[in-house]
Image (tube, grey):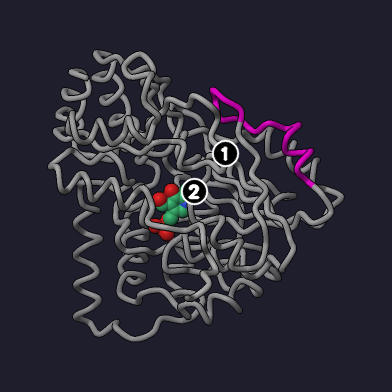
Amino acid sequence: MIQSKLPNVGTTIFTTMSQLAAQTGAINLSQGFPDFDGPQALREAVGRHVMAGHNQYAPMTGLPALREQVAQKIARSYGRRVDMDAEVTVTPGATEAIFCAVQALVRPGDEVIVFDPCYDSYEPSVELAGGRCVHVPLALPDFAIDWQRLSDAIGPRTRLIILNSPHNPSGALISRAELDQLAALIREREIYLVSDEVYEHLVFDGVAHASVLAHEELYQRAFVVSSFGKTYHVTGWKTGYVVAPPALSAELRKVHQFVTFCGITPLQWALADYMSAHPEHVDELPAFYQAKRDLFCDLLKGSRFTFTRSPGTYFQLADYSAIRDDLSDVKMSLWLTREHGVATIPVSVFYQTPPKDLRLVRFCFAKREDTLRQAAEKLCRV
Ligand SMILES: Cc1ncc(COP(=O)(O)O)c(C=O)c1O
């Protein structure tokens, strides 16, 4: 019998719920992807570049034209001038970027702090590097950093902290003041950061995203990760990027070079064209997704779910304790899918040790208006 290197990893709840939604014909608000397409001009550009013969390996660090667009966007959005050659690396998805950053930094015996609930790729990446995740729960009900618990979790073996803002699954945001607090906490230690900012442009209610890219001190020890998939409604393209100071980028690239070597060439050409022609796309995203959030939340007011509007991401949490307090969130998600035709994700799966009596499910509102209306109608009958 093979001895698994990842004995705790099985089929993820995202696969399970999407399969169940397909089998039962339920509306799928579980997995995080849009049910609408990315911009037509972007999709057409891929075809054009494939036909123009842009089908061989891209440079290992990413197509220069795309890295230049990323650098320009960072200057516009966060006021930082990055060196596109030394600091920007295009990767096949944010997941690969996170994996490479972790492999580049974490050695056997090192500890990596993650905040629960957390995205499911972090821990396997750390374990494969021989490290150990130390899970620090975010404080309910707002999913804020619990500074005492974070401070208690930091020790001599702490090598890395993985941040995620806007946060999946809660939508919570880390503020600039919190970044300052973090900087003060780790100032005297050799601790690095992976800042998972894949939802950087999905921040609502006029709030500005506090990126680590805009924080001089933290940036000097950070890998900041983003995803074109989220920003351009093309999650299946699995194309992202990571920005880090030159020395850190150099270490990450040593790993990336032998994991995939490079991202997919025609997709990078298309993204470079589109970003250059439509720099306004990212500025329009908050209003685009806020309208979806508000539609969904307004409709959900007619239900027995309780919630506060998500400050960011394309996820909305809802408390169902007034409906079926007797069910765990996993059972509730299965019940909602099978009996009421709406697939959701239980929040407990994002935890190492879920809080007792957690009664929260996550809905993805990256959906067409008619999908959101149909889903809400069903949820209002629960
Ligand atoms: C918090 C978070 N990080 C990373 C990713 C992965 O992004 P990509 O599809 O670009 O690998 C996701 C996707 O759902 C996510 O929610």
Label located before the other in sequence (1 or 2): 2
* 180 part of magenta stretch: no
Q: Report crowding for label 1: few under 14, some 14 to 19, many 20 or more residues within 10 A (C-alpha).
A: few
Residue 106, relative to residue 342: is it above or below?
A: below
Report whether the residue tagged 1 is closer than 8 Å to ligand 1.
no
> Which callout, 1 or 2, points to the residue nearer the camera?
1
Quarter of the rendering containing residue 331: top left
Q: Nearer the viewer, residue 270 or 157?
A: 157
- Judging from the image, what secondary structure is the residue with disc 1 in? loop
Residue 56 visible within the image = yes
> Dividing the image into 4 quarters, which one contains the C terminus?
top left
Q: Is residue 128 left or right of residue 32?
A: right
Q: Which residue is mark 2?
A: 119
CB of mark 2 near ligand 1 (< 8 Å): yes
In the picture, measured across the screen, residue 12 lies left or right of residue 72, that is: left
- Say which residue label 1 marks: 353
- Coordinates of residue 374 in the picture (x, y in percent): 14, 29
Cα separation, mark 1 vs mark 2, equals: 14 Å
Determine whether label 1 and label 2 are within 8 Å by CB: no
What's the magenta region?
Answer: 139-154
Disc 1 marks which amino acid?
Thr
The residue lying at 43 percent from left, 25 percent from top is 359
Q: Amino acid at mark 2?
A: Tyr
The x, y position of residue 34, in whole percent, is 26, 46
The one of 334 and 278 positioned closer to us in this rendering: 334
Say what secondary structure mark 2 lies in: loop
